[in-house]
């Protein structure tokens, strides 16, 4: 089962390497890894999708907390959440298939962000299933190149993952970050 783990970490050099090395040492295969800044200065948010069982994930979370720069870790797998992925897909555009591509883009609520005489670059945002479905429809038309950002996720509701950097959020674990 794919688990969606969110880790708040200090925004310092080497943190990504330490987290990825932990996954490698414990023989976890990372399906998706996205890292970005948060609204809190000095704090980055990692969204990690990994295929594993619940027991192994609990152990992994405990190992993550042992890393010096990890502030908080939450498993969002079993909570209501919103997930998104972004893909840019370069597809071959011939005079014969241009209209079909544009109609397909509309159906999937994607956007054409670049046009040449021979290709389109299409941007699509959504959950993984939507993007996979779009890719399968485009594949027979001639995908030239594709890039995806990886999954980002947030728990639904008004509560933040952590409160002012030092309180309990939505999840099971308490943050141990001191402002």
Image (cartoon, rainbow, N blue to C red):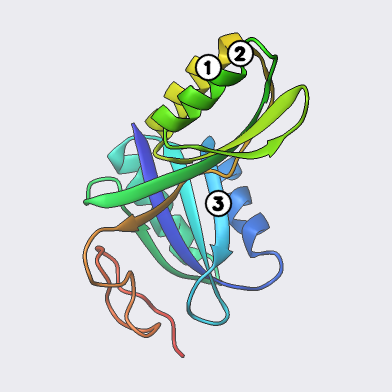
Q: Residue at x 36, y 75 (%)?
A: 175
Which residue is the site of mark 3?
Answer: 34
Badge 3: residue crowd in 10 Å (few <14, some 14–19, many ≥20): some
Camera-side residue of 113 and 31: 113
Badge 2: residue crowd in 10 Å (few <14, some 14–19, many ≥20): few
Distance from the alpha carbon under mark 1 to that under mark 2:
5 Å
Q: Residue at x 67, y 29 (%)?
A: 120
Residue 61 image offset from top left, x and y in percent: 40, 55
Which residue is the site of mark 1?
Answer: 100
Residue 93 image offset from top left, x and y in percent: 68, 19
Q: Work out whether 44 lies above or below 24.
A: below
Camera-side residue of 5 and 37: 37
Element carrying mark 3: strand
**Which callout, 3 or 2, points to the residue nearer the camera?**
2
Location of the N terminus (image quadrant): top left
**23 with respect to 175 (left or right):** right
Place residue 74 in its image quadrant: bottom left
Residue 35 image offset from top left, x and y in percent: 57, 58
Q: Earlier in the sequence, mark 1 or mark 3?
A: 3
Distance from the alpha carbon under mark 1 to that under mark 3:
33 Å
**Which callout, 1 or 3, points to the residue nearer the camera?**
1
Residue 156 image offset from top left, x and y in percent: 24, 59
Distance from the alpha carbon under mark 3 to that under mark 2:
34 Å
Marks 1 and 3 close (CB-CB < 8 Å): no
**2 with respect to 40 (left or right):** left
Element carrying mark 2: loop
Which residue is the site of mark 2?
Answer: 97
**128 with respect to 135 (left or right):** left
Q: Residue at x 64, y 9 (%)?
A: 96
Badge 1: residue crowd in 10 Å (few <14, some 14–19, many ≥20): few
Q: Residue at x 76, y 30 (%)?
A: 116
Marks 1 and 2 close (CB-CB < 8 Å): yes
């Amino acid at each position: 089962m794919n688990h969606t783990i969110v880790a708040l970490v200090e925004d310092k050099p080497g943190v990504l390497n330490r987290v990825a090395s932990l996954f490698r040492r414990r023989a976890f295969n990372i399906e998706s890894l996205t890292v970005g800044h948060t609204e809190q200065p000095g704090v980055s948010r990692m969204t990690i999708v990994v295929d594993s069982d619940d027991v192994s994930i609990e152990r992994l979370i405990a190992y993550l907390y042992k890393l010096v720069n990890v502030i908080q870790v939450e498993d969002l797998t079993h909570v209501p959440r919103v997930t998104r992925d972004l893909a840019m897909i370069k597809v071959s555009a011939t005079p014969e298939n241009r209209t079909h591509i544009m109609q397909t883009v509309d159906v999937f609520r994607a956007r054409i962000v670049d046009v040449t005489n021979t290709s389109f670059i299409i941007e699509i945002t959504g959950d993984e299933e939507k993007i996979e479905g779009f890719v399968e429809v485009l594949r027979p038309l001639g995908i030239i190149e594709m890039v995806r950002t990886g999954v980002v996720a947030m728990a639904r509701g008004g509560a933040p993952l952590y409160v002012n950097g030092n309180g309990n959020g939505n999840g099971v674990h308490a943050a141990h970050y001191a402002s």
